[in-house]
Image (tube, rainbow, N blue to C red):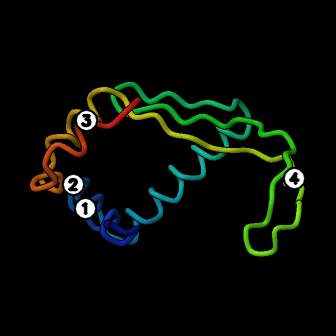
């Protein structure tokens, strides 16, 4: 699993900037993504993927610990659908080696 600091370090190296500046640029990028999703509900990045914000209505459920009925407030769910180039690059990634056929036979 990668973390923010690893992302910042790789960004800094690729962009030939300090880690501090890379962290600032990453924060700006994340802020802009959030702003666009809040205003438009969707952000398409060709070759990478699509972020979508979707309104989720109020729903009823059961607390598994108590068995009591509960009502979940309406809210927003954010999803990400990777683009084909991203999926292909990840599928060729070394972290998948040794996992056999599990990842390729997933039901849709």
For the residues labelled 3 and 4, the Cα–Cα distance comes to 36 Å
* Residue 105: mark in rendering: 3
Within 10 Å of disc 3 (Cα), the crowding (few <14, some 14-19, many 20+) is few
The residue labelled by disc 1 is 10
Left or right: 66 as drawn, with respect to 31: right
For the residues labelled 4 and 2, the Cα–Cα distance comes to 43 Å
The nearer-to-camera label among 2 and 1 is 1
Circles 2 and 1, Cβ within 8 Å, touching? The answer is yes
Circles 4 and 2, Cβ within 8 Å, touching? The answer is no
The residue labelled by disc 4 is 73
The residue labelled by disc 2 is 14
Element marked by disc 2? helix
- Residue 80: where, in percent of width, then height? 50, 39
Q: Is residue 97 above or below residue 21?
A: above
Left or right: 47 as drawn, with respect to 63: left
Q: Residue at (21%, 61%) from the top-left corner?
A: 13
Q: Who is closer to the viewer here, 67 or 88?
A: 67
For the residues labelled 4 and 1, the Cα–Cα distance comes to 39 Å
Within 10 Å of disc 2 (Cα), the crowding (few <14, some 14-19, many 20+) is few
Circles 1 and 3, Cβ within 8 Å, touching? The answer is no
**Earlier sequence position, callout 3 versus callout 4:** 4
* Residue 82: mark in rendering: none
The nearer-to-camera label among 3 and 2 is 3
**Earlier sequence position, callout 3 versus callout 2:** 2
């Amino acid at each position: 699993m990668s973390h923010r600091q690893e992302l910042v370090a790789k960004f800094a190296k690729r962009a030939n900037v300090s880690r501090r500046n890379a962290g600032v640029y990453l924060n700006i990028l994340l802020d802009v993504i959030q702003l666009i999703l809040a205003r438009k509900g969707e952000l398409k990045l060709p070759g990478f993927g699509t972020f979508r914000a979707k309104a989720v209505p109020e729903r009823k459920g059961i607390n598994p610990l108590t068995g009591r009925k509960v009502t979940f407030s309406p809210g927003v769910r954010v999803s990400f659908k990777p683009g084909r180039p991203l999926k292909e690059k990840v599928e060729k990634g070394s972290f998948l080696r040794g996992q056999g056929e599990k990842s390729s036979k997933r039901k849709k």
